[in-house]
Amino acid sequence: MKFDDMRPFIEKPFDFIERMGLKAVVLEPRNIRLMVPLAPNVNHIGSMYAGALFTVAEIPGGALFLTTFDVTRFYPVVKEMAIRFKKPATTDVFIDAALTEEEALRIASEAETFGKSEFVLEGEIKDAQGEIVATSRGVYQLRKHV
């Protein structure tokens, strides 16, 4: 599958993601960049809604799955997610995530051998000026289709 063909699976997997306006800015092997616009995600104090920030922190695991692993053999699961809000986000926000080739090979090999493999993604959600507005830590699993 071409990376541009993956966009709908990242930007519109279900109605909530589509409504929040999440966009896949970069889709490359083992490397992604996502963006969420401030509007329509403004909360009661004029900054980005915490749920939108949480969502943009969680989605990279699935986006990296699509650009890295064989979707006919494996599927992703999020096991744990933590977020720490640093400052209000008053602009669009971005998150980058990547896996090294070695880490991707380890994950796929373990999932093939044991049926599943765990991996961790640490993230920094940044505003349009590059300031960190939140940090995240997600524990994901790659599972083998049975």
Image (cartoon, helix red, strand yellow):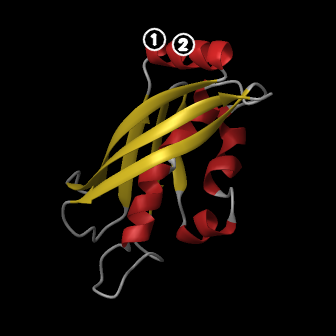
Residue 48 shown left or right of residue 134 in the figure: right
- Check disc 1 and give the amino acid type: Glu
Task: Indicate the quadrant where residue 45 lies.
Answer: bottom left
Expressed as whole percent of the image width and height from the top left, the position of residue 86 reads 19, 60
State the residue at coordinates (73%, 30%): 71
Residue that appears at 28% across and 71% down? 90
Pick the front one: 144 or 14: 144
Q: Percent x, y for residue 44?
A: 33, 88
Quarter of the image where one finds residue 15: bottom right
Cβ atoms under marks 1 and 2 closer than 8 Å: yes
Quadrant of the drawing holding the N terminus = top right
Q: Which mark is on residue 102?
A: 1
The extreme front residue here reads: 114
Q: Nearer the viewer, residue 105 or 24?
A: 105
Direction from residue 28 to residue 1 in the image, left or right: right
- Name above or below for residue 42 compared with residue 139: below
**What residue does disc 2 label?**
105
